[in-house]
Amino acid sequence: MVERYRFMNHCIVVGRGLNYANAYELAIKLMETCYIVCERFSSADFLHGPVAMVEQDFPVILFAPPGKTLQDILKLARQLKELKAETIVISSEPSILKWATRVVKMGRRIEDFLSPIPYIIPGQIFAAMLAEVKGLSPDKPRSLKKVTETL
């Protein structure tokens, strides 16, 4: 799947609730390993303006675990389909997967409060594999100092 995104230079990552942190994590990984300009939003914030950026083939990655945030993400997925966006949906829920351009199907339904850890794993793998397809090392990003010092 990552080969399709070899020339991607911008994208949006959306999560809601506990998976909002995953939107941040994946966006950071795509920026540091693939040098992609990547914004991250909750679905609520995204619909209040930034959705205006989306046009045909604009890449948007959605974290859509089961639970109380699924309906908000489903509503967004439908709107993105109407806008002809290029969507990658990470979910175990068939109701949202049918709205995606590309699917990362999670193996089984998991409780909402447990979802952030297993749901970020395919995102991190996607970023690492995309870096490699782009001819970059995901382990040696340019200008990144891996050791953090606290004074």
Image: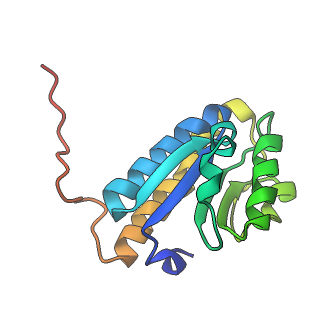
Classify residue 98 by image quadrant.
bottom right
Q: Is residue 84 above or below residue 116?
A: below
Query: What residue occupies the far left of the structure in this picture?
Result: 151
Quadrant location, the N terminus? bottom right
Residue, x 68% and y 30% (percent of image)?
113
Residue 31: x and y in percent read 37, 55
Q: Is residue 55 left or right of residue 77?
A: left
Q: Quadrant of residue 143?
A: bottom left
Q: Is residue 71 left or right of residue 147?
A: right
Position of residue 106 in the picture relative to residue 123 (left or right): right
From this view, report whether residue 113 is shown above or below residue 29: above
Quarter of the image with the C terminus is top left
Question: Farthest residue toward the right?
Answer: 95
Location of residue 59 in the rendering, given as x and y in whole percent from the top left corner: 58, 65
Question: In the image, residue 108 lies at what x, y percent?
Answer: 76, 51
Q: Nearer the viewer, residue 91 or 53?
A: 53
Let me know if residue 86 appears in the view. yes
Quarter-of-image position of residue 70: top right
Q: Residue at x 17, y 46 (%)?
A: 145
For the image, the number of numbered tags is 0
Residue at position x 81%, y 58% in the image: 78
Kindly tell me whether residue 106 is visible in this rendering.
no
Residue 38 at what x, y percent from top left? 45, 55
Q: Report the residue at 66% width, 32% height from top.
A: 17
Q: Nearer the viewer, residue 87 or 131?
A: 87
Q: How is the image coloured?
A: rainbow
